[in-house]
Image: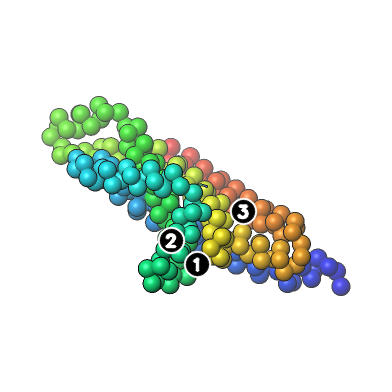
Amino acid sequence: QNQSQGFWAKYSGFFVKGALNTLLFALLTVIAGTVLGTILALMRRSKLWILKAISAVYVEFIRGTPLMVQAFIVFFGTQVLGLSLSAFTAGAIAMGINSGAYVAEIIRSGLNSVPIGQTEAARSLGLSSGATTRYVVLPQAIKNIWPALGNEFVTDIKESSVLSVIGASELMFEGSTVQGASFQPFFPMMIVALIYFAMTFILTRALGFVERRMA
Ligand code: ARG
């Protein structure tokens, strides 16, 4: 019996399961991150200093601490509170919390990239400040925000590998499992790398395609 056939028969399922969970994590994260990031970016633009301050502190703190630490804090912190979240749920929450801070900055800089004259013109024509943001600034800001959100999606595919430390099943975790079970430290990680690369390469290409069509 050919040894490599034995390897695939035994372990291909691990890689498939891990890859699918990685995609699921990235998808959930980019959705949660966009919702949270939008709220944080709007808070940052608010006239109420308390909302501004909460948003600024959140973004600074989350971007100033490692995702790995945040994953442990969500996973064990919820246990301390008497909740028992699965590693998957805790991981998804940690990723969403993390990505929200990065997306807030993406949206903030996207909105800031629209020249102030656009706002002044809209306001002098009698649009309210909310209407100005919604109908004048946002449609122009989207051009900068969309590609950066695409990059965030790619980042989330790779960064979800950190969740292996709390035992959440994703590609890195499943790859480590195969390393242990097969007594092969190198080959499974090469497979993992190739699968990550295939996912990010295809996604980058797809996003570039959509971007060119929007231009
Ligand atoms: N490795 C960094 C960390 O541990 C990156 C965090 C994720 N980055 C992102 N754009 N969502 O904090």
Q: Quadrant of residue 123?
A: top left
77 lies above or below 39: below
The answer to which of marks 1 and 3 sits earlier in the sequence is 1
The answer to whether mark 1 is within 8 Å of ligand 1 is no
Local packing at callout 2 (Cα closer than 10 Å; few below 14, some 14-19, many 20+) is: many
Residues at discs 2 and 3 in contact (Cβ within 8 Å): no
- The quarter of the picture where the C terminus appears is top left
Residue 59 in the image: x percent, y percent? Answer: 37, 45
Kind of element beneath mark 3: helix
30, 166: nearer the viewer: 166
Above-or-below relation of 37 to 144:
below
Please tell me which residue is depicted at 21% across the width and 38% down the height of the picture: 132
Residue 87's label in the rendered image is 1
Query: Sequence-wise, which precedes: disc 2 or disc 3?
Result: 2
Query: To which residue does mark 3 refer?
Result: 196
Task: Quarter of the image for the N terminus: give it.
Answer: bottom right
How packed mark 3 is, by other alpha carbons closer than 10 Å (few <14, some 14-19, many 20 or more), is: many
Q: Is residue 150 left or right of residue 61?
A: right
Q: What type is the residue that disc 3 sits on?
A: Tyr
The disc labelled 1 sits on which kind of residue? Ala
Tally the numbered discs.
3
The answer to the question of whether label 2 and label 1 lie on touching residues, with beta carbons closer than 8 A, is no
Name the outermost residue toward the front.
80
Choose the circle earlier in sequence order: 2 or 1: 2
